[in-house]
Every structure is written in C-alpha cells, then in structure tokens.
Image: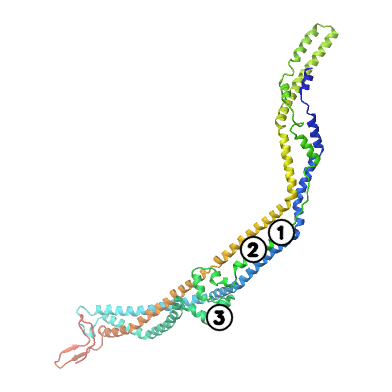
Amino acid sequence: MFLHYFFLQIPDVSDPLNLISDLTSLDLNSTVIKARNFIEEIPQKVSNQTKKEVSEIQDLLYDVKNEINAISDKFHKMISLKDISAFMENIVKNANYYKPLVVTYDSYRWGVGVCLCCLLLAIIAFNVLGLLLGSLGLGPNGMQWPTKRGCLSNAGGNFFMASVGFSFIFSWLLMLLALLLFLVGGNSYTLVCRPWANGVILQYLDTSELFPELNVKKLMNLNVSDVNLTSIYKSCEENAPLWSTFHLDEIVSLNDTFNISKYTQNIDSTLNKIKINVGTIELLEDEQKRSLLKLSAKDGPLNVDFNSTLVQLNQNLTKQDLTILANKLEEVAKIATNDTRRNLTHQANQLKEIQKWINLKFLPEIHALKRSVQSLQKSTPQIPSLINLTLSEINETNSFIKHQTEEVIKKETKTFILNTMNYFSSYLTWVERSIIGEFGRCGPVAWALDSMNTVVCNYLVDSLNAFWFCLAWCTIFLLPSIILAVRLAKFYRRMNVDDVYQDEIMENFELSRQSMFKMPRAEMKK
C-alpha cells in the first residue's frame, strides 16, 4: 500500500513524452540531412552558374600573362644579352687561344732580360775589378816602371780593356734594343694608358668608325642618343643597374606597363555580371516547428514539479527488514503442525526472496531514478530557451539563404580575386623596383676594365718603360766608362817598351807614371 501511495505522488509526464514522441516521429534527422545536402550543393551550383564569367576572368588573366611575357621579350631584345654573352665568350676564347703563346714569349722575355742584365753587370764588374786590382798592384808609392808592373796591376788593366771590348761589341745591340722598347713602351703609354686613365680613349672609340663592333647602340639595338661607352663606364663605376645605364626608361615606360588598374577594370565589370540563384529550403517543416513551440511554451508540458518526487525518493521506502520477519516465521513454524509449518516456511522463504530483490534491484533502481529526476530537474528549465534559440537561428539561416547568399558569394569571389590581384600587384611592384634599381648591376664590368688597365699599364707597360729607361741610361754611361777604362788601362797594364821623354835640360819624365794622389789626366808633351 505504501509503494502504491508512493507512485501516486510522482507527477504525470505523459504529455511531454507524447510531444517528444510525436516530434521524433516527424523524422528530424532526415530534415537535417536534407538541409546539409542543400548547403553542400551550393558550391557546385555556384560553379555551374558562373562558368561563363569565370572563363572571361581567366581570359583576362591570360591576357595579363601574355602582356608580361611580351614585355619580357621586348626587354631581352632591347639589351641583347645573347649578343653581349657572345661578345664576352669570343674575348675569353681568344684569350685562351693566345695564352700558351703569351706564356712562351714571357719565358723568352725573361731570358733576354736576364742576359742583358748579366751583360751590364759583367761590364760593371770588369770596371770594378780593374779599379781594385790595378790600385792594389801599383804598390805603396805608386812609382813603378811600366815594364815592371805586377800581375795584379796588369790584371786590372786587362779587366778595363775587357769592359771596353764588351762595351764596343754589345753597345749597338743595347742601343737598338732600347730604341725598340722605347717605341713600343712609350707609344703604348702615350696612345693607350694615358688616354685610358683620363677617359679620352673611350671618347675616341665613341666617335671613331674603326671599331664598329664597339658601337653600343648597334650592339644592343638601342635608339637612345645619350648612351655611349663613356657614359656606360661612368655608370658602371658607380655599380648602376642596366635600366639607368642604358636609359631604358626612354624606350619603355614601366609605370604604364605594370599599371594593373587597366586589367582590374575589366575584371570588376565581369564580376558585376555574375548572377547566382542557389534556391531556397525550409530547414524545419511547419509541423516540426509547432511541436517545438508547444514543447518550449512557458507553462507547457515541460513545466513539471519534481520536488515532491525527490521528497518521496529521499524517504525510506522499506522501513523494516523482511529477513527478520522471515526468521520469526521460521521459529513459529517449528512449533506448528505439518501443514502450518510448510505454509509458514514457504512464506518465510518468499519474504527472504523479496528482501533479496529489494536489496539487489529495487534500491539501486530507486537511486538511479533519483539521479535521473535530479538531472531532469536541472536540464528541463533550459530546454525551452534552447528550443527558442534554435528556432531563431533556423529562421535567420532561412532568411540568409533566401536573401543574402548571392551577395555573399559575389562579395567573397570579388574579395578573393582582388586579393589575388593585390598579390600580383605587389609582385609587379617588386619586379619594377628590381628592374629599375637592382637588375644587371654593371659594376663588375668597370672593375674588370680597371683590373685590365692595372695589368696592362701598371704591370706590363710601366715595367717595359722602366726597363728600356734603365737600359738606355746604362748604354749612355758606357761612353764615359770606355774613356775612363782606356785611360786607366794605360797606367795599370804591363808594357813591353818603356816610354821615356828627354827635354832640353836633360830631365827624364816618364809619361806613364803619375803620383798616386792625382787622378791621371791628359798632358801635352813639351
């Protein structure tokens, strides 16, 4: 009776259960799947409806690509990089061809220079040895008869005569060689190195028709009047790019070429032609909406009071343990008759089974029911607000699909294309900046020419001029060397016949003997 009374205290939830059953029978899952399929089909619908416009935009982008390629081809034709490369390769090929000959003749030059230096050194050595040996061989007082001079003195005179002989034999060769080297080195310095240093040679090459292969305008197919070798060299000394070096801005206007606005205008007009119709769909049917509205009503079926149920569940539904009653029945059965004993024993066993069922199943289920009721008590008040929020979002979604889908797709498409064009514009800006300020800096060309000037003029021509200059002065000094050597050899060499002169007062003077403290000089005979 108590349990029957307890279950009568639980509130009636049949109405919300019926509404929920009716709502589930309306198959909300199929409606959701249908709406998801509709949304997933929107990209394919947009693709099918915008094929023509997309094709037009692709054609416009291909036109931009072809325009850029045409600019690139025109730029390559203007500066003729292939001709420049062929010219440089020809120079390198000729340099490699003549390199073995240069190495061979350089060894010859080295040998001839060493021989000439050894020859001049030998003449100087003969003079020094002649002066040293002759001075040492004259004796302490320097007074010796010419026929009695010693070996050292005679050797010194012979060394003087040897230097004279070498000077007469090779002086013509030295003078001829100095003259030839003067003609080569002097003219090279005057006609090449000096004009190269002050820039006159570049001006001559610009105005001369003797070297048509050095005509920059013809070589690079340029129609600019201010471009010549002089201006190119000055620009390359500052490591300037090719654009400013060759004044290409007078031929091609990069601002007009890379102006992307003339392409975006056509793209904007094409985007405005796009018309998209993705259709409409009801995310919820009317019957489903009515069921949800009934379920979310403020005083609707979900307004259930679970407090009384929780009060009943918190009470002790089984106040007495049936096992105690079963034990008492068994004690009574022991003193009863057979029929009564069997009946009481059977009743005691049933009471134990009931107590066992209460402990194992009934009480856990009561606790689970209590937890479920508590959970329902917390979540049920939130269900109407969630349903209202869901219905509001569904209505907004329906309105968005009906009225704003086309505009959003057009806006996003335009934004995507404009972002792409902005990337392309940034790329063109970088290309323009690179061409004007970075592409083809020609500083290495000027540095290579300066290095060539250093090698040819500073190392070759200057060395050659220094060599012939020294050789010429050595040849000039051979004349006083010959005169002094001949004069000194007479006083140092041993003679076979003594030369004596007797004057009017019968005083003897030996012409070949002089004081050691006087330089020998020519004197007139009396």
What residue do we see at 69% from left, 65% from top? Answer: 63
Residue type (three-letter) at the residue carrying disc 2: Ser
In-front residue for pair 333/502: 333
**Residue placed under numbered mark 2 in the picture:** 261
Residues at marks 2 and 3, CA–CA distance in whole angstroms = 44 Å
Distance between the Cα atoms at labels 1 and 3?
A: 58 Å
Front label number (1 vs 3): 1
Q: Label 3 sits on what residue type?
A: Pro
Q: Quadrant of residue 73?
A: bottom right
Instruction: Indicate the secondary structure of the residue bearing disc 1.
Output: helix
Asked whether the viewer can see residue 80, the reply is no
Q: Is residue 249 visible?
A: yes
Cβ–Cβ under 8 Å for marks 2 and 3: no
Which residue is at the front of the view, 516 or 229? 229
Instruction: Locate residue 272, reporting x and y percent.
Output: 71, 59
Q: Residue at x 55, y 80 (%)?
A: 212
Quarter of the figure with residue 460: bottom left
Q: Is residue 297 above or below residue 457?
A: above
- Provide residue 469's location: percent of width, then percent of height: 38, 80
Instruction: Give the Cα separation between the discs numbered 1 and 2.
Output: 16 Å
Q: Which mark is residue 272?
A: 1
Rate crowding at label 2 as few (under 14), some (14 to 19) or many (20 or more) other CA atoms within 10 Å.
Answer: few
- Label 1 is placed on what type of residue? Asn
Q: Earlier in the sequence, mark 1 or mark 3?
A: 3
Q: In the rendered image of this protein, does residue 334 appear above or below residue 91? A: above
Hey, which residue is sitting farthest front in the picture? Answer: 299
Relative depth, front residue between 95 and 500: 95
**Relative to 133, is 526 on the left or the right?**
left
> Which x, y percent locates residue 412?
69, 54
Q: Which residue is mark 3?
A: 212
